[in-house]
Image (tube, rainbow, N blue to C red):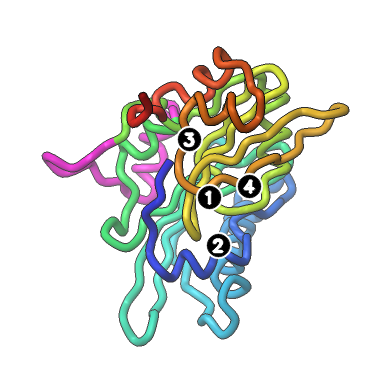
Amino acid sequence: MKSWIGFTFSLLFLAGLAKASAAPHASTGDRDAVVRSIVQHFYVKGVPGFPVPQVPRVAIAGNFAIAMVRTEIEGSPYYGEFLLERFPFGWQTLEIATDSRTALRTCDLAAHDIAPHIVRLLSARIGIAYAKNGAYCPARGTYADRGAIKSVLAIRKASHGGIVQSVRAVGKWGLLSWYGGGGGDAIYKRTNAHWVEISGGGGSACPRDLVDLYHMPLSTARILLQGFDSGCK
């Protein structure tokens, strides 16, 4: 539930270009090319005139990929790394390390509950740093998807863009945590077999907010926001 991000990414995400689709059973070479294309188009289409960034390395293991980005912004070097996951509908960005952090860390992957053997494979292929002593690290599973797989996938597919960090689904209710051009919680509700976004969010929410605004059962709201509601009374 991050709301921090650099000015450049704020511009990029106003264009809503973090989500792109790809053939789910492409070869390794094809998958590398697809991931590179997603990352490059993320910049080029997000800000007209933005130079095509270099994506010197892509590492893929299982359904996860890390792409390294190198380019310039106003004459200054710019570095970053994308963490993507491949779903049945295509690839989607889970995380971007940029600005003060230019590389993903093992704890960033653990926060998405990525299996240790996949982390080891990605690290061997692209190199993943360990967090420095004293640096903040989210707990393992903090941003792991929760709920019925069918519901989680449907909400992810219906998302408007941005970095879709995590999705939680309980019954007919869903919460999508995103960032980019701001950040916060998007509330989804299943209506007539379709998941519909009823609030795009902006900042974080508390269980009582969901009850008062959307008439969501308090027990459901507490499950959806578990671990994200530390500032709530």
Tell whether label 1 touches label 2 (CB within 8 Å).
yes
Above or below, 110 against 102 in this view is above
Q: Residues within 10 Å of mark 4 (few under 14, many from 20)?
A: many
Span colored in magenta: 113-137
- Circle 3 is placed at which residue position? 205
Three-letter code, disc 3:
Ala
Please report the residue visible at 53 percent of the width from the left and 67 percent of the height from the top: 12
Q: Residues within 10 Å of mark 3 (few under 14, many from 20)?
A: some
- Circle 1 is placed at which residue position? 163
Tell whether label 1 touches label 4 (CB within 8 Å).
no
Residue furthest left in the image:
133
Three-letter code, disc 1:
Ile
Looking at the image, which is closer to me, 233 or 94?
233
Please report the residue visible at 62 percent of the width from the left and 41 percent of the height from the top: 86
Secondary structure beneath label 3? loop
Q: Residues within 10 Å of mark 2 (few under 14, many from 20)?
A: many
Q: Earlier in the sequence, mark 4 or mark 1?
A: 4
Secondary structure beneath label 4? strand
Please report the residue visible at 55 percent of the width from the left and 62 percent of the height from the top: 13
**Residue 142 image offset from top left, x and y in percent:** 40, 29
Front position among marks 2 and 4: 2
Cα separation between marks 2 and 1: 8 Å
